[in-house]
Amino acid sequence: MPDPLKGAATNRRQFLALTGLGALAAASGGALVGCSSNKPSGPGTTSANDLSKILPQYIPNTAVKPDVAGVAGPGGAVSDAVFLKYPSSPVKTVASVPGKGGSYTTMTPLWGAIPPSSGNSYYDAVNKAIGASLKLQPADGNTYGDKLPPLFAADKLPDWIQIPGWNTNNLNFGQGVSKFADLTPYLAGDKVKEYLNLANIPTAAWAPCVWNSKLYGLPVYPGGGGINGAYFFRRDIFEKLGIKADSIKTADDLAALGAQLTSTAANQWAFDDLFGNDAAYICQMFKFPSKWGLDGSGKLIHKYEHEGLIEALNWHAKVVKAGHVHPDAVAGNNQNAKQRFWSGHVTVAADGTGAWNGDDAKSGTAANPNYRRAAFKLLSASGAPTIELRPGAGMFGYLNGNLKPEQIKECLAIANYLAAPYGSAEWLTVNFGTEGDTYTMQDGNPVLTEKGGKEVATTFQFLVTPPTPTTVQAGFVDVAKDYGAWQADMVKYAMKPPFFAMNITEPSQYSSIGQAVNDTITDVKFGRKPISAFQEAVKTWKSQGGDALRAFYEDIRQKYGTGQ
Amino acid sequence: MTTEVLKRAAWEEKPTPAGHGAKTLTIAVVLAVILVPIYMVVITSFSTQASVNEAGGLVLVPSGLTTAAYEQIFSNQLIMHSLLVSFGITAIGTAISMVVSVLCAYGLSRSGSFGHRTILMLLIFTMFFSGGLIPSFLVVAALGGYGSYWSLILPGAVSVFNVLILRSFFSSTAQDLIDAAKVDGAGDWRTLWSVVLPTSKAVLAVMTLFYAVGYWNTFFNALLYLPDNGMWPLQMIVYTYTLQGNSMPGTGVTNTGQYFGHQELSPLSIQMAVVTLTLIPILLIYPFVQRHFTKGVLLGAIKG
Amino acid sequence: MSAITTEKVVVQPAVEQRRRLRWHDKLRRDRSLLIMATPAVLLLIVFSYLPMFGLVTAFQQYDIYYGFNNSPFVGGYQFARLFTDRLFWQALENTLVISAVQLVLYFPIPIALALMLNSIMSAKIRSFVQAVVYLPHFFSWVLVITIFQEVLGGAGPINHFLRENGMATWDIMTDPATFKYLVTAQAVWKEAGWGIIVFLAALAAIDQNLYEAAAADGAGRWRRLWHITLPGMRSVIVLLLVLRLGNALTVGFEQMLIQRQAVGRDASEVLDTFAYFYGVVNNNFSYGTAAGVFKGVLSLILIYAANKVAHVFGEDGLYRR
């Protein structure tokens, strides 16, 4: 349909260009003329050249040896190391107390019950160990994103705040990041040697901390490159039915299981949601990019334009129509997805890899002692499987720009303590508190006491974290081994997508054009609308800004590279 | 104050069997439709993980019961303090809101009074237009509300909806009573206090309930304006329990592990325990309000 | 209802003089009333009117970082974009349709329930039912929809029964065509009990002597209902009706959000979710604010119209001329 706003849009674009605002204008030369301040206006991206000068040097810690070492794959991917027991004599990685008695306010998200803020012996123990006073203020994780814009707008940011990557979208972070302290002078290159535990964090995790050629963020829960998730199945149910998981290699193999695993009389369905939010899980199986990719001729192609997505939609609609997907999953009831899996009401489910741990096993075995979670080796619609790497960290801690240099140094020293690697003495204090008080060692692994269960939560860890290995929880050693083995296999197929770990703020006028396509995808994947509706939606998307976005990214590619 | 009329009044006929039957049936259906889900919620809160796993969700017939969910919630030291905070906010907030609303409602209840239409428009306008989250935050923060308890009370102290209802009830107070007061030389304040209020007990009770429930459930303002956990009202603390078992978006990392002392517990049970606990104060308050709804209330001093 | 003045009654001054003196006298006469209204007005000015400067973002391309002062001004661009957005009109249509359905199917229910409860003889049963029936109001929408899904969903007992007996399943939870009725049913379940409270208060305010007198005159129960009870509740009913019409564009947010995936956007998008998805979530605050401004203006028009209609029926409605 003809765009009646073309005239207005052009005028606006000219207007914006005059004032130097708006990334479209800025994309042609990164116009540094702000409206009333000297802040740069641009997408917040950094070129590969600059990046190499800014990133901290990677100095892996060799003092702690895992039971199973991480396996390296292409694209710099590394699977998690596996620890079956906590090292019996944990090494000290921080020589002296890092803090100088300073006190700082913090803010972190928390998905779970809030521990008491006063009279908390765990908080006290950690604060004593770091020699400073961090005032922890965990906030509800689900609504964290609602809180942030007002805080930015009113300049009420605490001294040390953690912001998940998925919340930076509506904060115009390319600009907003200037409210935080620039850490480049303290950590770039070999300056990081002063903070050896921070140097232990892989480079892939530091890359997304860089904005506008400056290092701002501290990585939280970094890894050698994470992935979106995996396709899990109930190994015990498969074994009972005599299904060999290794023989399931393609999407069609998976769909064929549907009939065998569905028995509505017994309240069992084969599949839970296999698509994922924004095609997060299914993009791996059908080999289309999770956002932008490169097509055969090296041109940028968005996932909406990719063949793979159409195949995925058709496949999924078929499975849903056959009645093999649990009705609650079709109704969008995702918060009970794990419960359905534990109950055996679904046999195959897609989920994040964080679901595969000892606590999950504990919940699952509560009703069925044979419960055993496993994941398919990477599936593919056709040909060899691939899996897209996600940036090495998804959440980042930032220090307030108002802090003085001594304060920043103190906080970095504290961060160095908090980032002590798994297997060190400090890690136990930060993650579990005091032995005998908030945790005890059982079978060589730390377990929270009842008191610990109330006082310890993911608080300090959300400010900065060392790379997390796979460990044993709740005594389920096999789970750790299974997961480790699966990762070692998966990492062979890893690949870096274009713009990997690059921070790019898209122009805000295009930020909502994807919503309509997403909604249509939801309708098509459940068979409510035909595939032609999706194709229509993509056409609209292109004209509303999809093509303009491609031009924007093409420009980024020219200027800053693709981070691969 | 009022006596319960337990017997049918002299002038009321006995109900017809059909009417009685229909009424009974309707009430039974209404009760069933509401009580069965409530039962499911309560039972799930007392169910073990095994029971929940078997049911695959909310439990109807449990295979095992446990009070672990409640134990875990009550053992949180923050709960006690947050209860105090909630009580304080509710009591003070309701008092402020009721005084302000009653005065305003009465002040606008006399049609023809000076400027009452303008002020009414002013009130109604705010029901449909709002500056948005960020401007509201900026205003409250500029006034020093960030990190302060009054940010939970003052911004929402006036509910225009409640004022309008109060006004409607006040306007329909028997005119003769007001005239009688005027003849006795009472000014507006006196009239409000000695004539209108005593005859509006039912609506005052209802509005108090509405405001009290509103303050008790205050959530979003606490979320925005109170970063310090130690200051949180009950709903905030209790809401975070409902997130257990939920994964952080994009990471798949579930937060059940570190926090659970009792691994026998399903996140669903805790969520349902939270809901059940929310219902208890309501059930306790209701008798007080309900007292004003009984039949046979003889109003005022109008005789014959 | 006209106010009875307590001024000097005897001499009627000339019309002109009366008009000139009038507003001074009125002000003096009503100053207590104005003082009474002041605290509420002050609070609203500070916390509702002051933040309204934020409405200016509807005319800007607002950006958090640049703030209200520095975000570029774009005039009516957001509104032009809004009115040419097919999805906006779809959201508006959904909103009005759901609102209409709720008006017809939901609005009368609390009234009927209140009347029925009021006629229960046993105080014990009456209190019990009243206390139970308003509990669902305190459930979150997530819980309410979970409950509906558990009972009516594809994996629930009803569909289980249908499947076992060879009948087609009733996919009410995922059917876009019946979504408006589902949404109304959910609203009734959750809110009807709470809604009866105001009506109970109104019923309690009716003078019981009127019933006695009517019965003495030979009026049966239905005539008493029609001539005493309903008229006694009329002003409250009309007030709430006018308010409901004014709020016709607000039909729910969380409720629609949660079920968006189940029935699809076409059935579940309402103005509030539209503003959310195309405004807040996607960093396009201005667009969302523009939708909000449109909603506010339309609501004002609706409430004005509803009030006029109320006047036609002889009721005060929200306010008299």
Image (tube, rainbow, N blue to C red):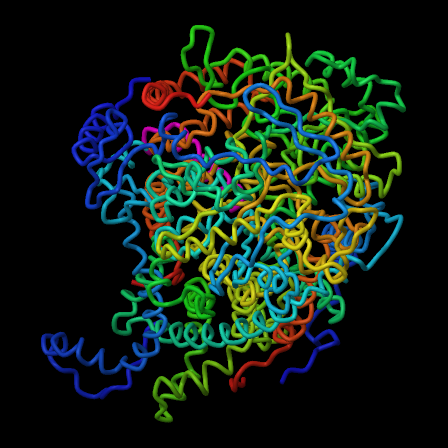
The residue under the point 33% across, 34% down is C82
Q: Main secondary structure of the magenta part?
A: helix
**Residue B287 at x, y percent in the picture:** 67, 73
**Residue B269 at x, y percent in the picture:** 75, 51
Q: Foreground: A269 or A100? A: A100
Q: Is residue C92 magenta?
A: yes
Does C136 sit left or right of B217 as displayed?
A: right
Numbered circles on residues, count: 0
Residue A422 appears in the figure:
yes
The residue under the point 64% across, 7% down is A383
Q: Is residue A95 magenta?
A: no
Position of B249 relative to C47 (above/below): above
Q: Quadrant of residue A356?
A: top right
Position of B250 relative to A520 (above/below): below
Residue C89 appears in the figure:
no
Q: Which residues are magenta?
A: C82-104
The residue under the point 74% across, 12% down is A253
Position of C268 relative to B197 (above/below): above
Q: Quadrant of residue A86?
A: top right
Does A511 sit left or right of B114 as displayed?
A: right
**Residue A97 at x, y percent in the picture:** 55, 59
Q: Foreground: B224 or B194? A: B224
Q: Foreground: A75 or A530? A: A75
Position of C279 relative to A314 (above/below): below
Quadrant placement of the N terminus of chain A: top left
**Residue C129 at x, y percent in the picture:** 72, 62
Q: Foreground: A440 or C320? A: A440
Q: Quadrant of residue C239?
A: bottom left
